Image (spheres, rainbow, N blue to C red):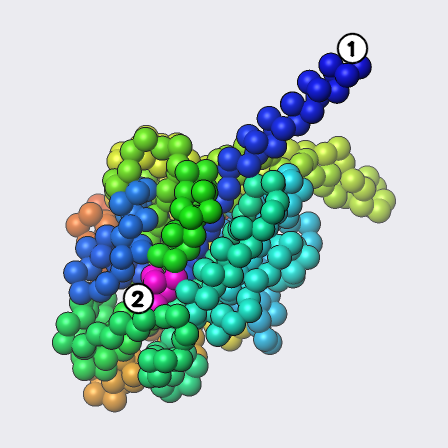
Amino acid sequence: MIRILIAVFSLTLVAANSAMAAKNVVIFVVDDQGFQAGCYGNKAIKTPGIDRLSASGTRFSDAYCTSASCSASRSVLMTGLYNHATGHYGHAHSYNHFSTYDSVKSLPVILNEAGYRTCSVGKYHLAPERTYHFQEYRNEGVQGNRNAVRMALNAKEWIEEEDDRPFFLYFCTSDPHRGGGPGGFSNYNNDPDYYPGVTPIRYRPEDVVVPPWLPDSEECRTELAEYYQAISRLDEGLGVLLDALVETGHWDDTLIMFLSDNGPPFPGAKTNLYEPGMNLPLIVRNPDSENAGIETDAKVTWADVTPTVLDYCGVTPKPAPPIVPGPNGDPPRRAEPQPYRFHGRSFLSAVGQEHPDGFDEVYASHTFHEITMYYPMRVIISGKYKYIFNIAHQLPYPFASDLYASPTWQGVLKRKEELYGKRTVYAYLHRPRHELYDLSADPHEVNNLAFQADHQQTLEKLQAKMQAWQLETRDPWHLKWEYE
């Protein structure tokens, strides 16, 4: 009888491990890419890897980062929490020194606790490490996280290791972020043999597609051509990684997400919560979904990424005992464990659906990029309307150091041009406290409805929703409604 019980128990463990093994996850995050991909309608750029993933999954048209800054954005997608509640307001590196509270549980830590093996390849840009701890870091020979082919080979070696546990791979390229210094993109594009294993693809400035939010200038076209080259480089690495999943037998048991941390590295996109800065590519392949190669209009944000992954994996975070104030000034004490709560929610049910119900409203919260760039903005997009609350509107809009030095922006300044893309230079630098746009009629956000009498009811409705959301998500900047 005991032998029978042992055998049954052993079979149960095997079945449990088998079920767990069938739920792997890959999140592929690129740095500063917008809709520059063939599957998103750009006919000039070559992105066979991204297009291949799109053809086998679901392409989101209304996906948004919540903070248009590299480090801050990554903290959101790795925690499911807005960074105004976690303290990760901006960059983690150097003197910026923003980081996440110790009490926050990140996706890799939750999956570590659930029996997953976890690995980070490439750009990390989070802090502190103990809060975002991965069991493995495989970054040999990745050349500043720009050799995505080598990164993919490193990932394949890790996936192939003998280990029955399911895996979570966090794969982040530094491409297509512009390089440091005045050379910008050309700093890492000029030597075609610099990245072993990568086949460089070059573009002519006259062939690129200049989006409406950028000026169609010689400087801009030259930069876009080099930017495209960086995107094609990361795309080749994505293709190698997809091949690796097929070759290792994990194509049909792995959830794959491809997304960008924030918009393109040009003024008007990155660091902005205008559409080019926050409306970004998201492609999701759920191997359990019957529909493939479709586009969905579900509105989702990077705060939804962690809840979606955990939903797919069937993992519930362990309850966390919150610290609460003691009565009558006594020292703080730990209350009874409470279910761990996210600001985001799972969008797994929207994958494979063109028009899913209940995904028509999102929120965003941006406060810093570099430490010198204080400009808190809060956003709600509800249906066709978008409301932006510029909390520090009295200040001129601040520049990231690399964006200000870009030849595109410097060309505008040198020629003293009035327009930058669709808006005036003055309007870009000096913003009102409230901005309201009808995105269906005004996708480039140039006609501010916030001060028009016939839109006051819509404005007040969105402001009320925003304030309720700020209170619910413990946003300290909610106080600005009261005393400024």
Q: Earlier in the sequence, mark 1 or mark 2?
A: 1
Instruction: Say which residue appears at 78% left-offset and 40% top-offset.
Output: 334
Q: Farthest top residue?
A: 1
Mark 1–mark 2 contact, CB under 8 Å?
Answer: no
The front one of 23 and 413 is: 23
Which quadrant of the structure image shows residue 75?
A: bottom right
The 10 Å Cα crowd at callout 2, few under 14, some 14 to 19, many 20 or more, is many
Q: Quadrant of the N terminus?
A: top right
Task: State the separation of the CA atoms marked 1 and 2.
Answer: 62 Å
Query: Bounds of the magenta span?
Result: 233-237
x and y percentages locating residue 358 in the rendered image: 35, 32
x and y percentages locating residue 95 in the rendered image: 60, 76
Q: Farthest right residue?
A: 330
Image height of 94 relative to 451, above or below: below
Judge left or right: residue 90 versus residue 401. right
Which quadrant of the structure image shows residue 280?
A: bottom left
Instruction: Say which residue appears at 61% left-offset and 45% top-offset.
Output: 163
Q: Which residue is mark 2?
A: 232
Judge left or right: residue 313 versus residue 380. right
x and y percentages locating residue 101 in the rendered image: 66, 55
Which numbered marker is on residue 1?
1
Q: Is residue 261 magenta?
A: no
Image height of 203 relative to 67, above or below: below
